[in-house]
Image (cartoon, rainbow, N blue to C red):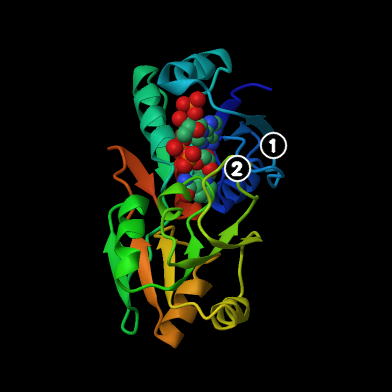
Amino acid sequence: MTNVKRLLILGGTGDAAELAAKAAVIEQIEVITSLAGRTRNPQAPTGMVRIGGFGGEAGLLEYLHEAKIDLLIDATHPFAAQISWNASSAAVSCNIPHLMFIRPAWLQVPGDEWIEVDSVEIAASVLPEFAKRVFLTIGRQQLAPFARLDNIWFLMRLIDPPAADALVPPGMILCDRGPFALDNERQLLIEHQIDTLVSKNSGGDATYAKIIAAREMGIKVVMVKRPPTPVGEKVSDVESAMQWLINQM
Ligand code: NAP
């Protein structure tokens, strides 16, 4: 095949998987998705897949050269900041067209009772003022700041259980993977008598039902704001990412 371009998608999100499936349909594009390797049974995206960290910005730069990558799309989760900054710098260093796919953040609407905070650590520090039973939905990597809150009970929803040596807050672990239906979220909030939800502002539809359920029941939401993103080209939907790809051919 001539004029085939190799596209590296930095993945780990549903958006990245959707993009890989659509990009793979373009004949002149060969798709490789990179996953960090955090999830035990990741849903396999269309096309080639590589798994594991690159070894920082230098390692990513080396990989881009060795794998002869022509185009780079960063479709990682909005809270996966390190890899996004590494990708941005590496793409500039080797002059590869680079796009960031960032789904829009959720916005507070009438009826929402959000307390917006800058980090997971600050989310943990504000809880003792008002929370007794918390639905914690921030993933399994940052549970430690909540582990010292002995007077709060946590329902922790995670894709995989925490590591055996992880610091885990008092409460119950529920292993499940989105998308989550509104009825499911209502049921969890009622069954566990939740008074506060802690969430990252991930955006997207797959995990938004918990925000609606909290609104309906007058439950407070401690919403962790997104970290800053590098300067560069950005889109917020798959169609625009596909258009960017077509423009690069
Ligand atoms: P991070 O803090 O930005 O990344 C930490 C390190 O993990 C990076 O420096 C890199 O290691 C490696 N890494 C991250 N994403 C990678 C990828 N797609 N391919 C290869 N290596 C990757 O990210 P994180 O918060 O740990 O998230 C890890 C992955 O989980 C991301 O790909 C993200 O899309 C997904 N995810 C994260 C969240 C979240 O809330 N953070 C939620 C859902 C999904 P090296 O420096 O060695 O290259």
Where on the picture, by quarter, is residue 100?
Answer: top left
Name the element at disc 2: helix
Q: Amino acid at mark 1?
A: Gly
Q: Position of residue 16 (x, y in %)?
A: 56, 46
Q: Position of residue 81 (x, y in %)?
A: 39, 40
The CB of the residue at mark 1 lies under 8 Å from ligand 1: no
Where on the picture, by quarter, is residue 202?
Answer: bottom left
Mark carried by residue 198:
none
The foreground one among 95 and 246 is 95
Task: Identify residue for label 2.
Answer: 23
The residue at the point 32 percent across, 72 percent down is 114
Q: In which quadrant will I find the N terminus?
A: top right
The residue at the point 37 percent across, 52 percent down is 120
The residue at the point 39 percent across, 49 percent down is 235
The foreground one among 163 and 213 is 163
Q: Residue furthest front?
A: 150
Q: Is residue 68 visible?
A: yes
Position of residue 119 relative to residue 74, above or below, is: below
Residue 55 shown left or right of residue 184 in the figure: left
* CB-based contact (under 8 Å), mark 2 and mark 1: yes
Q: Position of residue 138 (x, y in %)?
A: 48, 56
Q: Counting other residues with Cα less than 10 Å from the Cα at mark 1, is it few (<14), some (14-19), or many (20 or more)?
A: some
Position of residue 197 relative to residue 44, above or below, is: below
The foreground one among 151 and 210 is 151
Position of residue 49 relative to residue 116, above or below, is: above
Task: Identify residue for label 1.
Answer: 47
Foreground tag (2 vs 1): 1
